[in-house]
Image: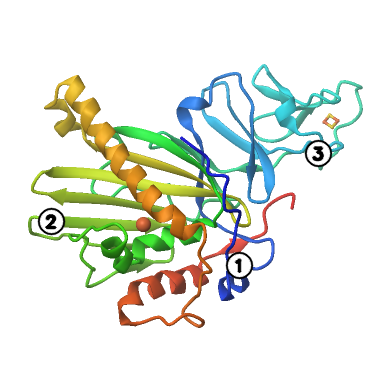
Amino acid sequence: MNAIGRNRINLKIGQWQNDLEDGNYYQTWYPIHLARELKPGQIVGKEFLGTRIILYRDAAGRAVTQSAYCPHVGADLACGELIEGEVRCAYHHWRFGPDGKCTDIPTGDKIPPGARLHNYPTAEKWGLIWAFHGDKPSFGVPAIPEVEEEDFVGITGERGERPIDHWLSTSNAFDFQHLRALHGLPHQAEPKEIDETPHSLEYGRGQNGPFRHHGKVTGTNTFAHCVKTPQGEHFMLVSSAALALGKSLSFYVVGVRKSVAAEMSAPQLEAHLDQLVANAVKLYTEDEPVLFSIRFRGPAEGNWVGADRHLAHYFRYLREFPQARPFDT
Ligand code: FES
Ligand SMILES: [Fe+2]
């Protein structure tokens, strides 16, 4: 999908910039690539957390995410090749295994102990490759409420690069005023309660009635929901990777339960999923003019009112969220 290049970042981040210390990023699962576009034998280089990473598949087909700059003199390993399941640097042909260790220096020199790549914990779910910012994930890869991946049929897509930080788009999910005012979603009623854990905020569990909206933020950057209406039930996940300060890469997943898909003909299912994609794109399209030009005023600077209490909750949660400086920055 299109990357939007106009309106370079015009965000006054205010106090939120201070919450995220200079050079730090939140320690969350970031979606970084469409799984179907990571082909065996290929090394993909990407911007991530203010530095660069490489992605490839190991001999068993598992996705690997590693720091991109060669520990020798710093060539970008995306210029290299995958040889027998190992990354070979283009510059002097040092090799690195999927565990990050240097395995060979063609000159026969002793391998220095620091000659290793940083491995990001990596997972594949919902059609996306996810990388965790940290040595060990402190929570699981984001879920979609009320459906497991094996019971799900859907479409995963990439919205593209956006000139905003991911926390701004995620805060949208807790801005219930805007759901009605900007998106015209009258049924997305405000929740009475939000269940909080150190790595998630969730509302709408166990609701009854013709309209049900069960939403969940996982980490700082993923929002997923299950919406039930008299017309049926559908699921959506939106998430962004932090590429650099003020720059993110957004992905979406939409779909239905497998048992529901099984009752449709192939053209019906295709049309239904296309409609769900169109609905997701409509939300992006309505949000982007506002989010790309906002001078965000947090609760201390703006005139926040009672109806902003859930938005304030998200920002309180964000303030407590673990953050760290990325490898190689
Ligand atoms: S820079 Fe990579 S092998 Fe020398
Ligand atoms: Fe929105």
Q: Can residue 54 be seen at all in this image of the molecule?
A: yes
Q: Specify whether 296 is left or right of 191.
A: right
- Above or below residue 195? Residue 51 is above
Left or right: 24 with respect to 172? Answer: right
Front: mark 3 or 2: 2
Examine the image and state in which quarter residue 128 appears.
Answer: top left
- Please tell me whether mark 2 sits on a helix, a strand or a loop: loop
* Residue designated by label 1: 20
Q: Quadrant of residue 42?
A: top right
Cα separation, mark 2 vs mark 1, equals: 37 Å
| Image side of residue 28 versus residue 266, left or right | right
- Which residue, given by chain and number where applicable, does mark 3 sit on? 71
User: Which x, y percent locates residue 290?
Assistant: 44, 60
Q: Is residue 136 above or below residue 313?
A: above
- Across and down, in percent, residue 238 comes to 39, 48
Residue at mark 2: 211
Mark 1 C-beta closer than 8 Å to ligand 2: no
Tag 3 and tag 2, C-beta contact below 8 Å: no
> Is there CB contact under 8 Å for labels 1 and 3?
no
| Residue situated in front as seen by the camera: 51 or 6 | 6
Q: Please, what is the three-letter code of the amino acid marked with disc 2?
A: Phe
